[in-house]
Image (cartoon, grey):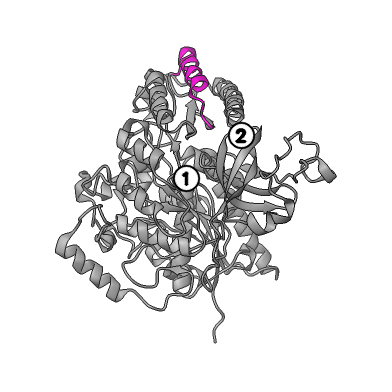
Amino acid sequence: MPERRTVALVTLGCARNEVDSEELAGRLAADGWDLVEDAAEADVAVVNTCGFVEAAKKDSVDALLEANDLKSAARQGEGRTQAVVAVGCMAERYGKELADALPEADGVLGFDDYADISDRLQTILSGGVHAPHVPRDRRKLLPVSPAERQGAAVALPGHGGAGSGGSQAEGAAGTAGAVEAAGAAGAAKVAEAAESAPADLPAGVAPASGPRAPLRRRLGSSPVASVKLASGCDRRCSFCAIPSFRGSFISRRPADVLTETRWLAEQGVREIMLVSENNTSYGKDLGDIRLLETLLPELAAVDGIERVRVSYLQPAEMRPGLIDVLTGTEKVAPYFDLSFQHSAPGVLRAMRRFGDTDRFLGLLEEIRKRAPQAGARSNFIVGFPGESEQDLAELERFLTAARLDAIGVFGYSDEEGTEAAGYAAKVPADEVAERLAYISRLAEELTAQRAEERVGETVRVLVEAVDEEEGPLGRGAHQAPETDGQVRLVYPEADGPDADGGPYAGQGLPAAQPGRGLAAARVGEDVAVGRMVEARVVAAEGVDLIAEPLVAAVTGAVPAPRAGAAGVGVTAVSDASRQVGEEAAR
């Protein structure tokens, strides 16, 4: 029997890339590849690159070079790595240019190669050459009219099927109250897909039959998973190159999103985070711009799902009905990841964006009227061409009044192919660095103050890890993975945290009142990874919170995943790279 082929996936960048890696993993597993965690033990190391900002691109190149070192070691008898392959946004954006500049990579594969990833890797592993693509503007691959995009034959990572937009019709049955799409033709495609779906996919690859959501293999056991809601973007922000290599906006069918969510729940996932370049546009190409408002309650009703979180919201596209659903639906997190970018109107106009300080503050006020404890975060660019000292002061005014839970700050730098790269009135690099340092310090102070305001609140914490030294760690509804801080749960005995010199002795936390504390003996039993714990915030450390669980407020036991469901693989080379990619992409 021939030796099994092995592959490791190294993921950098944002949550959308993590979803893409799990799609690639699913396709490879379905074709007989073994997924391994240690890249040194893989025949092929696949690096899913990020291509948005310089820091992330540098991390991607470094990861490819590190993987190439594994090839050199294998030739010396250490490890087995024979090939290094680049995929992802940087590979798609630069294609042949990247291949020419980085001969250490044995292959550079674009999005059009994902459906045939197994054949591509086998060709490269066998010593063959796969010619890298010449980059093209992917916005031109879809019709200008959003209504005409569904069914277009375009590769859409994370949308499943055979790698084309045509596969979207397989999910056209829709959901109760959602889009009644495709009629008889759509029903025929659904039936055809169900008949052709293989019944013998390896355990852990989603799903084995029925209308096909993306082939997906989990690369970890976290109780949190991202789900792609759409791909691409129709906005034309002058600083952003993403639409040129991710393409125009196209929604996934509601049935596909629900199918994938149900499968993830079966694997032990308790929180899903909906990701795309712009979630507020969901449904506009399906005939209903308010489709997200319909879909969210259905996702929240999926058995086993305890929290649904929506990321990537555009302030200019927010609407009262969406705010109502986000703030008033059980199990939907009142969380607002709003892409403000700046608040000075002149800078926003130069960015090809909309709004100003007072409008943005008004939006936040409307949100907090409905849900006073709602979470809000955003990213900002300083040093944009033409930004004056008055503009910077206006941004400071907004940040001071906004009470954001998390703030990402980036110094402007030119991105090739963008409108802003050709702007005059560039702010000198040293001035950009000074403004970045100043606003970053301000952001750190303001977010720490916001965390302090949460002391005394009751939060629902999803436990994601149990650290030997720090104890259970998780996140509240106002905290997204990777970027927004965390909650540390403390378990004082009835006589108080300082008794018996426990792990939290000397931290100055209040003693538990009788009947409210959770005895340490119950920690391992009741507060495990995947549990949802109701807790009272008793202190803050920067953006992180310290909270004391309440008795009888632990829910969400995690069932064991189905046999073979626990996927393995390398999920990141650099945590810093992931955070940079995640925040910058917002």
Is 535 left, or right, of 217 in this rendering? Answer: right
Assess whether residue 125 is covered by the magenta stretch. Answer: no
Between marks 1 and 2, how big is the CA–CA gap? 28 Å
Assess whether residue 395 is covered by the magenta stretch. Answer: yes
Q: Residue furthest top?
A: 390
Residue 454 occupies quadrant = top right
Q: Is residue 387 above or below residue 60?
A: above
Q: Residue furthest front?
A: 514
The quadrant of the picture occupied by the C terminus is top left
Find disc 1 in the rendering and name its residue: 51
Q: Residue drawn at (37%, 46%), measured in percent from left and top? A: 245
Residue contact at pointers 1 and 2, CB within 8 angstroms: no
| Three-letter code, disc 2 | Val
Give the mark toward the camera: 1 or 2: 2
| Three-letter code, disc 1 | Gly
- On the image, the x and y values in percent for residue 89 come to 44, 49
- On the image, the x and y values in percent for residue 501 come to 84, 44
Q: Nearer the viewer, residue 32 or 550?
A: 550
Overall secondary structure of the magenta section: helix
Q: Is residue 248 visible?
A: no
Question: What span is in magenta?
Answer: 387-405
Q: Is residue 23 above or below residue 344?
A: below
Q: Is residue 450 visible?
A: yes
Q: Nearer the viewer, residue 419 or 130?
A: 419
Query: Residue 543 — which label?
Result: 2
Q: Residue drawn at (44%, 22%), measured in percent from left and top? A: 385
Q: Is residue 443 above or below residue 203?
A: above
Q: Nearer the viewer, residue 349 or 76?
A: 349
The quadrant of the picture occupied by the N terminus is bottom right
